[in-house]
Image (cartoon, rainbow, N blue to C red):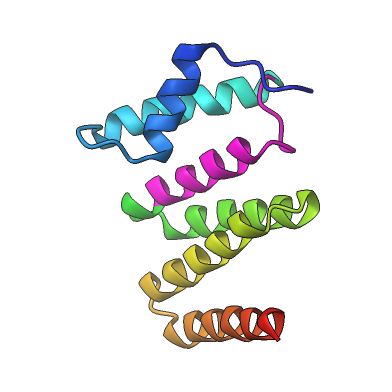
Amino acid sequence: MALVLNDQQRLSFEEVLDRKKGLSLNELSRRLAEFEQLAAEGLITEDEHIYHRLLMETARINAIRGNYPKAFEILAVVQQLCVTHGNRDCELCCRNNMALVKKELGEIFEAIDLWQKLLQEELELKR
């Protein structure tokens, strides 16, 4: 299904993704709740890159609020969606964010392992 957003919604979501200065955590949460509602209605679907990016932003807000397990859970979903839909850039960003969450959870060795795997893949791609 095609993305069906009006100009105001698109601008609102782009401000979230651009991390516009002056947006409070509550305002970000409100806009992300609007995204989740539109996704639930099928107006934004999981095959669209903006869906992946907004979902990753939802994970970031959860991490900021200290809900690391929920953030990691969302990031795992985003990673799978990125793989399924061939969104490699978002996948790499997602995996890096997963390592950051692991680090914040005190799982430093797991975080280092994730970063090491990312670096190894990138080196192999450049060969």
> Is the stretch drawn in magenta largely helix, strand or loop?
helix
* In the foreground, 119 or 110: 119
Identity of the residue drawn at 79% across and 52% down: 84
Q: Residue 19 falls in which quadrant of the image?
A: top left
Residue 90 relative to residue 27: left or right: right
x, y percent for residue 127: 71, 86
* In the foreground, 111 or 48: 48
Identity of the residue drawn at 66% across and 58% down: 79
Q: Residue 40 falls in which quadrant of the image?
A: top right
Q: Residue 89 falls in which quadrant of the image?
A: bottom right
Above-or-below relation of 33 to 92: above
Report the magenta residues as a range: 43-62
Residue 111 relative to residue 5: left or right: left
Q: Looking at the image, which residue sits at the far front?
A: 127
x, y percent for residue 69: 49, 59
Above-or-below relation of 25 to 76: above
x, y percent for residue 97: 48, 63
* In the foreground, 31 or 105: 31
x, y percent for residue 22: 20, 33
Magenta segment includes 44: yes
Magenta segment includes 42: no
Q: Quadrant of the N terminus?
A: top right
Above-or-below relation of 62 to 27: below
Marks counted in the figure total: 0
Identity of the residue drawn at 49% across and 72% down: 99
